[in-house]
Structures are given as C-alpha cells and as structure tokens.
Image (cartoon, coloured by chain):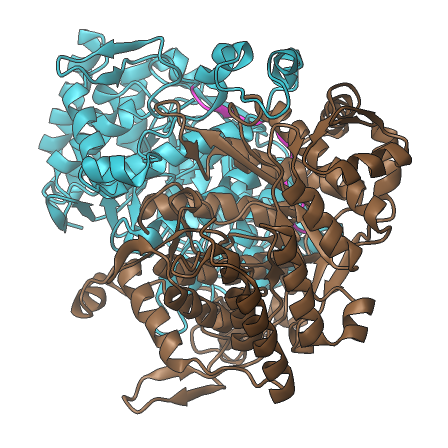
Chain colours: A brown, B cyan
Amino acid sequence: MSDRRRGRGNRRRREDGTDRAAPVAAPAFVTRKIPYLAYLDEDGLEAIERQADWLMEEIGLEFRENPHALEIWRKAGADVTDTRVRASGAMIRQLLKTAPAEFVQLARNPARSVRIGGDAQVFAPVYGSPFVRDLEGGRRYGTFEDFEKLVKIVAQLPSLHHTGLVICEPCDIPVSKRHLDMLYSHMRLTDKPHLGAITEKSRAEDSVAMARILHGADTTDANCVIMANVNTNSPLLVDKVVTEAIEVYCGAGQAIIVAPFVLSGAMGPVTTAASIAQALAEAMMCGAYSQLIRPGAPFVLGNFLSSMSLKSGAPTFGMPEPVISNYIIGQLARRLGLPLRCGGSLTASKIEDAQAAYESADSMHSTMLAGANFVIHAAGWLEGGLATGFEKLVMDAERLGAYANVLGGIALDDNAFARDAYSEVEPAGHFLGCGHTMANYQTAFYDAALSDSENVESWEERGSKDMRARAFERWNELLRDYEAPPIDPGTDEALKDFVARRKRELPDAWY
Amino acid sequence: MSDRRRGRGNRRRREDGTDRAAPVAAPAFVTRKIPYLAYLDEDGLEAIERQADWLMEEIGLEFRENPHALEIWRKAGADVTDTRVRASGAMIRQLLKTAPAEFVQLARNPARSVRIGGDAQVFAPVYGSPFVRDLEGGRRYGTFEDFEKLVKIVAQLPSLHHTGLVICEPCDIPVSKRHLDMLYSHMRLTDKPHLGAITEKSRAEDSVAMARILHGADTTDANCVIMANVNTNSPLLVDKVVTEAIEVYCGAGQAIIVAPFVLSGAMGPVTTAASIAQALAEAMMCGAYSQLIRPGAPFVLGNFLSSMSLKSGAPTFGMPEPVISNYIIGQLARRLGLPLRCGGSLTASKIEDAQAAYESADSMHSTMLAGANFVIHAAGWLEGGLATGFEKLVMDAERLGAYANVLGGIALDDNAFARDAYSEVEPAGHFLGCGHTMANYQTAFYDAALSDSENVESWEERGSKDMRARAFERWNELLRDYEAPPIDPGTDEALKDFVARRKRELPDAWY
C-alpha cells in the first residue's frame, strides 16, 4: 500500500510520457497484525487507574450548562452536588460495559466503510485549523475554496481512510452555516466516511439529519453512519457542548469520541502520570454518560496530551512525554475494552521542515504502534494545529502508508524465505536479477514516491528539490486528477435542499 | 536529559545576555527501563532461526583470503570444503555461549565508560561518509579539518555516548595513514569511548596499540578499551578484512561488532524474512569465529538492512521493511543473549529536509524501541551514508535525548500523581501557577532547544528560521565553546610518538 498505489500494473501513461497512478481499491482501513508494546506493567497501569478512580470518586467532574445531564447522573445513582458529579470507578466501569469494543461506521461507498476498535486502525486528516499554508500561497486564513481543495486531496489519498470534518476552517462562511457547507462537501466530494459537527446542538442535529438523507432512515437507525469528536474542558469540566453532542449522536445510535485535551502543567498536572489519569477519568465519565443516553451507543475513548515549552509555556508536540502517553493510553483503552482515539502527526513547527517531520514521525510512530483505532490529525497538522499544510497533508499521508505496512507484519511463508534463490545465487553473488527477486520486487517494498532516494547528481539535475517542493507538485497533481465519485441525483438534490433550507432559517453569525 | 542539558540550575550567563548550557555530567549511556515490542511471535522467530540454521548448515559461508581461518574452522569441527564453511546451528550456538551478554568498554574518563548489552543503549555518530555537508559550505569531500570539527561537536553532545571513528573520511590524508590521525583525535579531543580501524590488519593492530598506550597495558589486558565494527560481504561472504579484524581485536580481548549490510534484493533476497535470516546467519558465524579466536571475547551482533527503490534500485532508508527488521532483530539478538547493533537515524535524503527527518525518526524510533545496544549512525547521516551533515548531527542528537526519555519510563510515585494539586486547583481551573507545577516544571519535559514551539509571530520576528538554520547556529556555538579534556602529558607524548613513527614507516597510499 502506497500513496502512489502499489506496483506498476495499473499505471497509465500520461500525455507528457510520465507515469501516473490510476485509481485502484486500497484497503478501507488498516488491520493490525502485530502485538502491542506493554510500556507499563500491571502495577503501573493499576496505579493510573486508581488515580482515575480517585478523581471520579473524590474530586468529581463538573457537568455545567445542562441540568438535564445532572438529572440523568442523579437517576443513575451518582453523587450530584450542585454541578459536581462524583461516581465510583466501579459504577463507571459497569456503565461502560454496554459500549461496543468495536463497531463499523458505514461509508456511502460500502467498500470504504471503516471498522473502529479492536485490531482496526483508521487514519483521518487534521481537524479545526483556522489557517492554511502552502508553498505558493503562504500562510493565510482558510477559505471554503481551500477547504474543498483539501477534501478533494484527502478523497484521493489511500492512507487516509476517513475524511474527518474541519480539514481547515472555511473562515469566509459564517460560523452558524459553515457546518452545512462542510458536510455537503464531504458527502458529495468523497465516498469515504466523515465526522459530524459538534459546536452547537442544532449543528449536531443537522449533521445527523444530513447523514439520514445520505444513508436513508432505515440504514441510519440500524447502523453507525456518522461519528463526531468533542473535547472536554480540562481540567474536569464538561460543558453543554460535550453533553449535548453525546445526546444528539448517541441518542440517534451514532458514534461519539470524547477527547480531553490536556496540556500538562496547564489543563492538568505537569507530571505525565497525573495528566494521563485525569484524561482517563474525564473520558471514562463521558463514556459512561453516553451509555446512560443509549446503552450500546458507539463510544470512542479519546486522549490528547501535550507537553510544554519551558521557555514560554507554549504547547510542544512529538516530545517524549506525549509519545509515552500514547503507548500507555493504548494499554488503558484495551483494558477498558473501548476503541481509542489518540495521537496524530503532530508538530509545533510553522513549516514543513525537519522539525515538523521529526516531531510528526515520533508522534505518529507511537500513535500507530500504541494501537490508536481512530486517528484525527494523522496528516496535515502544522503549528500546533493552528494551520493545515497542503504539503504537510500529502507528506504525512505517504508516511501513513509506511506505517500501515509496519502494522501489517511480514510474510513468513516459503516464498518469503526464498530458499530456491540460494541455488540460483551463490555466496558473493547478487540477487538483483534472480528469479525470486523478479517475481517479488514489485510488492517487496513500500513505494514512497515523495522520498527521493536517487544519487545526489540525479537529484541536483532535477532541481535539488526538497520534500516540500515535491509535495507541492504532488497535491496539485491530485487536484488536477480529481474526479467526484458518483452520487444518486435524488439524494444529492435532497441534501442540497436541506442545506438551502437550513441556511435560510439560520442567521449569519461569526461565533 | 536534553542536548541543552537538564534544567536551568547550571546555566551560565553569556556576555550577550543569552543563556547557555554549562557542561554538566550526563549519563554515560541510556539504561532502558521499559519492555520490548514482541513484533514476531515464537513461531515466527523460530521460522527465521530455522532459515538461518539452514543457511549455515546447507549453504554455508565463504571464508576467503584467510587459510588460517579455514584451519580454525576445520579444527573446531566445521565442514570445510575449499573456502566454504558449513556448521550446524547447534554448533554455532554452542560456540556463541562464551560470548558475554554484556560488557563494559572503558573510556579514558571513567565516568564516560559505556556498558554494551542488556538494558544499556549507547548512541554513536555516523561512520564512514566520504562527503560532508553544511548549510554554509554545501556538499564537499570531507577533510581532516572537517573531521576534527565533527569530533569536537560530538564530544559535547550528551546524547552521543560514544564517538565512533570515521565521523567523516578525512580525504586529504592518505588512506594508509588517516586511521592514525583519526584515532589520535578521538583520544585527545574527547574523553568518550571510540572505535578502532578495521580496513587493513595493521591498521587494526595500530588501533589496539594506541589504545594500549592510552589506557595502559594492564588495563587493556584486563578490560575492553576499544571496539571495532566490520561488515561482512553479503551474501554469505567473509573476507580477510573481517576475519583479521576479529583476530586482532578479539585476540587482544577487545570487542568486535560484525554487521552484515544487506540491501534486500541485491545482497540478499528481496523478501524481508529471508534478508533478516541471512544477516543473522552471517553475524552468528562471525560471532562463533570470534569465540574460536578467544572464548569470552566481547562480540556484538550487527545488522544493517536496507530496502530498495523500485525506480532505480537505490537503497532506501526509514522505510517499513527496515523498521520491521529492527524490531525483529532485537528479538533474535536477545534470544541469542548477545548485544545488538542495528539501525540508526538513516535517510536517503541529500539535505536536512522533512524527508531526512521523517526517515531518520522512523528508523531511529524503531532502533531505540527494538533495544539496539549500540547504535552507529545514530546522528549525522545523510544521503544513504555518503555524506555527514553538520546540521543533521546536532538535529539527530537532540532527538536522541528525547528517545532516552522514552526509554527511561515515567515516574509513578506520589509526586507524579499530584493529588495535592487538586486541592489547590479546582475543576475548570488551571495548573500553571500551582505549587506542584512550580516544584516540577523544570524537569517535567524534555527541553528540545532546536524545536521552535513559539507562535508564528515570534518565529517570524526571529527571522522565520527553519530547523536547519537553527542547527547551523547550534553547531557553530558548540565549536566556539569547545574545550579539550585534560590528558596526561606523558600519554599524549607517547601517542604522538607512535603516530609519528607509524607515519614514517607507512607509505602514502590512497586505497
């Protein structure tokens, strides 16, 4: 699996004589075939769980702006004092038992439906950046034009299995209406699964309503067809954005990810163990709440931990503390039997330089090995999430293809051991032209098209381009190649009508 | 542990008012405190071992140019036909039992002695590049001036525990003599441990002789004070460079690393499992030979696997196949009870761009997690090993400090769980100024000085420098700060005399 597609058999000749990959089916998600790293031992995991239980039972979480949520907690037997909700670890774990260990989010193209949980790992692009950056246009506020370009690029990257939602903020559309345009783009321009909006209750409801149009009422009632991601207000605060998103999505049998974002030392204690435990407690209580809304609703345990610059207090990414936390939270999620969202290709760098790549690779290598089942920000993240990089998007996506191969394990059959080759190639010989090499070379190695591995002379002859320059060419090529997937005209009309009606109903608002 | 050293307590003020790290003791090597990833299960590992045994027993290795070696194998009971040596896996494993699972290489500064094997992980710089590259001087043949600069930089990087040997080739010195100048530089300009020469038998002997002068005859006889690295001629060929290096180093009770370099599809089969098995067989037989030379001599199992570009056959680095092989070879070495050398911060990129960093990070993340006990090329490698990058050296070294923290595990004591902080900080509050944060922030996070995590405005105000530009400033700063460690004047004289005498004896030769 490569972002240039595998092998050469299905390439077509372009008029300029260069090869170009033709669209072929890529796996809809990664199926992990390798074990996990047990970063912490049983004692260590229990210590973190004890701390999470202590937080839930002794400190509790604030559930604000939603008296209905407090009523639900009270009925369930939690200790509710004002807006503080305390519950025992045992009670929360009991509630979480109805959450599925894995579930399928249907895509409108069934071949692109994704499994979330278990040995499935699903990669989605960056989410929520107000700015975009590309090599030609520099850094600027994202527009709807940028947004649509990004959706079209993501639609064609085989290592991005899911298109997320806010690949950049379309800042030229009122906040009150942009979810409608974004959702329609995801539904029309790709046939991969995507996320719904959460910023306000009616926007969540619009998301589920549009999913119902796209997938049909029966399918939507019987399946997960849309999922949403929402962040708690760490430390230990859950506002109505969170509880209402849970109510809307889980109430409709759809999926919710709740991800505490903890910048250690600001939204949580400065020590890694305490930050992991706090994030676990926050996510567990939100998961329990999802099951109170609808037992069996798909819930994804989220985790997003960041370290801090000692110089300025700015969040840092790809550093050892969040790398470690990825490995540990993977263990903790599996102990709970819940799908996990964590990590991503994260960096604090402003541009696609070595810093961006070192930090993104360490962040994503640990995300991948840790067993994250759903990864938002797997590609395209720059500047601590403030900017979506067009080049960064295709660069990261190419590395995701490599990670998929690491997760896939290696062949250990007779062909893999190549005993026959040793009768053809003597010691001190070479395997370049031998039968085994000829029979296997097309699929033996990941084909990283953005990595230049040629000698320095060839590289200089081609203009001494760095990876950014090659990535710029690549995403422009993808945009030129883009073709929208077919859609039922009636469905398309119904979606357009919905968007038009809701836009008429909603006032323009910029918050 | 940071490449800017930990904390702020031991910084001194520079005249220009900026902070600079003062030299402090850094750990001499990394002591791993976390488990390993069991990438392959027992069946998979046994399948690879069976293949290695089959190669040793049925195909055999060519031991050429050294009839003495054949004689030794014959006496040990191996099947020797012409220059082909075949031996059973059982026999080879029996011989390897006398090799120590771990050993100490003494440094002339005892605080910098390194343990090789077990839970110790030691990082050394790039080895063998004929070219150097830096941001100002571009790409050029390495000179002795470059070499000495690189040694001085490595001497000051706390995450490089060992200085290796050929940090770049000093191409302006005859090949027949450059080992003498390189060895003297390592001995005089740093007090860390280093490697010896192997390219010709007398050069290996010179290396041991100089180590004997530096450490004294008694210490040298009773300890490992020098180690060397040599590559087999894959596939399945061991020439006299290898056997003589083993004879010289192990014969003197010193350590040898034997590392097959297998470009899958050229020097080994194109499939990963077969390449790993072949490299294992080659290294195991060389290890057995080291124990025939001197039972108990320190031997390090080496492994260096590369994948290949489908376009050109050029070697590629940081790709999933060698990443996987790092994890697997780590498992295999531990089963043999031998220290392991593998991996590094490898890339095919010509410059310090995102490609270089993505590939280096994935390569080194897996090297580190896999448990490589000794890592050559841990910093400074560019262009498939053809060039040593001055900026790359300090960039990689900074990431090595982060990896050391990942390997170090996390604190799980009362302070790490910070329960008191929750009485000070209410839900929805923030931890920035609380007592626990103030007491812990200086050591809570890895301080990656070359990573810019500030906001885009600050970054632009400081000139929009990418990581390369910052790294250029960093290594120049290190060179300005460099002070040679003290050395006993008598020892220094004796070393100089030895070098002068050998230079008189040796003809100038450029091969």
**Residue B325, above or below B94:** below
Residue A283: image quadrant is top right
x and y percent of residue A317 in the render? 45, 38
Region in magenta: B28-40
Query: In this orientation, does residue B499 appear?
Result: yes
Q: Is residue A310 magenta?
A: no
Residue ID at (36%, 8%):
B9
Residue A20: image quadrant is bottom left
Residue ID at (17%, 37%):
B178
**Residue A505, above or below B247:** below
**Residue B33, above or below A425:** above
Query: In this orientation, does residue B271 appear?
Result: no
x and y percent of residue B418 in the render? 63, 15
Residue ID at (65%, 49%):
A371
Q: Nearer the viewer, residue B46 or A334?
A: A334
x and y percent of residue B105 in the render? 43, 23
Label the magenta part by its dominant secondary structure.
loop
Q: Nearer the viewer, residue A214 or B311?
A: A214
Is residue A330 found left or right of A217 in the rendered image?
A: left
Q: How many marks?
A: 0
x and y percent of residue B61 in the render? 51, 57
Residue ID at (48%, 14%):
B433
